[in-house]
Image: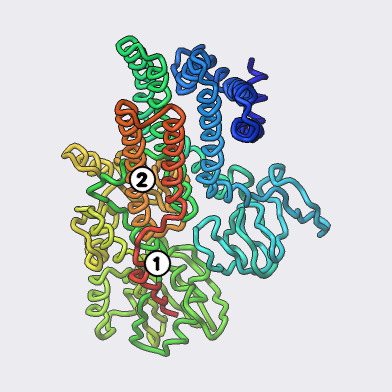
Amino acid sequence: MVKIQQFFTKYRHSIVVVTTVMLVLAEAARFGVHSLLAYQAIMVVAGLIGLAPILLTAISSLEVRLISIDVLVSIAVIGAFIIGEFNEAAIVTWLFMLGEVLEDVTLQKTRSAVQQLANLAPQTALVVNDDGTTSEEDVDFLDAGTRVLVKTGAQVPVDGTVRAGSALVNEASITGESRLVTKQADDPVYAGTILENGTITVETTATGDATTFGKIIELVEEAQDSQTKTQRFIDRFAKYYTPFVLLAAVIVGLITRDFRLAITVMVLGCPGALVIGVPASTVAGIGNGARRGILFKGSDVMDRLRHVDTIAFDKTGTLTLGKPAVKDVLVLAGDRQTIIDQAVAIEQQSDHPLAQAITDLSIDRQLTPTNVKTVKGQGIRATIAGQEYRLGNQQLVAGLVENAPDLKEKTTRLAAAGNSLVIFASADRSELAIFAIKDQLRPQTAQALRQLKQLGVKHLVMLTGDNAGTAKEIAAALPIDEVHAEMLPQDKARFVEQERQQGHRIAFVGDGINDSPALSAANVAVAMGSGTDVAMDVSDLVLVKSDLANLVTGFELANQTMRNMNENIVIALSTVVLLFIGLFVGYIEMALGMLIHELSILIVILNSMRLIKYSPKIDRRQFLKPANDLK
């Protein structure tokens, strides 16, 4: 029987075409040649052909003790045959199978966003061999460290690091935005992105399902198979509703002695639109988010997200870029550009984050320091052209700046503004400068937080391990309601748990390993795409682009998806109620009722498909462009 079912499933579209032709021929026989016998004979054959796949599915359902829609339709069609309503039997089976075909077609469209992503997955790579030649190989067989060549117009086949060349890369498949990003030596690149211009050699770090692109597809596919509380309720409802309809039909038949009416009750009571409406919304909504770089790990995340009233943010890497930058260079003695040239040359010998910020500054001359020595906890000492220089904290330069005018006042003012300070001093005291370094707010942060409040989030909190001064300085520029500084990972988790105990629905947004406890404790865990794998693993929602504007979009999309689900439920239940009213007042016959029933299924699917093209009403003009770093 399994093989027969597979046959009917495989050729379902063809069967619908055949039965459609037979119905047309039957009507032609009836009105064209006025042959009632031919009409009835064709209807019987069409009805039997249509009944076969429905009946086989019904038998399979009963074998697992499930009274499905197919069971109701099978009984109704068999009943129609018994009472001689062959045309009703043929039309009902044709409508039912046509409805299934339309469902297949439209549901395939709701999964189009994920299918588009999957189609982008690269299959082969141009591997650079030891002798400099290249060979095309399957990406699944590449190891970490393998070097691959990517040319203009090609997809990047692996996650990796650029080792040679430069290029403009379209990262829309990862970030959701199609702007071109310049990639050069030591920059990361991701599988599935497209090289618009240039040629690069990439050293592989991950392939296949382990790539960022592969994980995105996997997350979205898993999410689309998940269920909301609403969907689980509908499934349970349908499980008991179908036997209830069958029982109601039996009772109606016994009371009215009208076998035809009882059969019609069975047909019209099918909860098809109710069962299909919720998962259709789920698939379309999650697919829309994936296309925008917003990965919901399940439709239940959407359900939880729309009820969030409190959001707690980690600071570094979440509200801020997590990359310190030089905001000011105060020169107290010497030439500004000369000092910058010397400072950059010295700090290039260090991998400290503050040193990296200084090395990003623009230089006029390339200098080579000697006698470089790192002083633990203080800074670095080096010699350039016979002159010794020190670059670090006040303790390192104490012996060189005791008589420097205004130094104490300026360092106090800069520190109070939340800056980290690096002091540059020459041994002969002819050069002295202060580098003020600060982590930068993500350019869209303030606007995103304001829009979250407009969407109904009542309380915004910053949780950070940084000192209180820096935390308050950052929070002052944001619509933050509450700030907690100098917090350990367990402190953040404890705060989240306390908020939940007080009845709040809280989301936590973070990016690091240290955020994992708080993410795990939150009602909704949101990870920035630039964060660690651990943070993304424990999260419910991943913002691939690390853009808080996408969190706003996520809220809008979650609300719209749940609204769409509820619309589908109302459409489905209203249709059943109206059909029964029409049936008992005499306006609805079996075939007409079945047509309306199938149309209701198509309507809820089409309503769900609106989510594919839905664009949240976020005013992107409010989001500022990044401020230029000091160069």
Read off the residue under disc 1. Answer: 324
Identify the amino acid type marked 2: Asn
Q: Nearer the viewer, residue 541 or 451?
A: 451
Say which quadrant the N terminus sits in.
top right
> What's the residue at 83%, 58% (across, down)?
133
Seen in the picture, residue 457 relative to 430 is either above or below; the reply is above
Q: Earlier in the sequence, mark 2 or mark 1?
A: 1
Q: Position of residue 200 (x, y in %)?
A: 68, 64
Q: Nearer the viewer, residue 498 or 244?
A: 244
Mark 1 surroundings within 10 Å by alpha-carbon count, few (fewer than 14), some (14 through 19), many (20 or more): many
State how many labels appear: 2
Identify the amino acid type marked 1: Pro
> What's the residue at 31%, 26% (across, down)?
584
Q: Which element is circle 2 on?
A: helix
Q: Position of residue 437 (x, y in %)?
A: 36, 71
Read off the residue under disc 2. Answer: 564
Q: Position of residue 569 (x, y in %)?
A: 34, 37
Q: Which element is circle 1 on?
A: strand
| Quadrant assignment, res 274 | top left
Q: Residue furthest left?
A: 502
Q: Nearer the viewer, residue 403 or 219?
A: 219
Name the mark nearer the viewer: 2 or 1: 2
Q: Position of residue 366 (x, y in %)?
A: 57, 81
Q: Are marks 2 and 1 in contact (CB under 8 Å)?
A: no
- Whether residue 439 is visible to the viewer of this picture, yes or no, is no
Query: Quick check: 48 left or right of 590?
Result: right
Query: Quick check: 552 left or right of 71?
Result: left
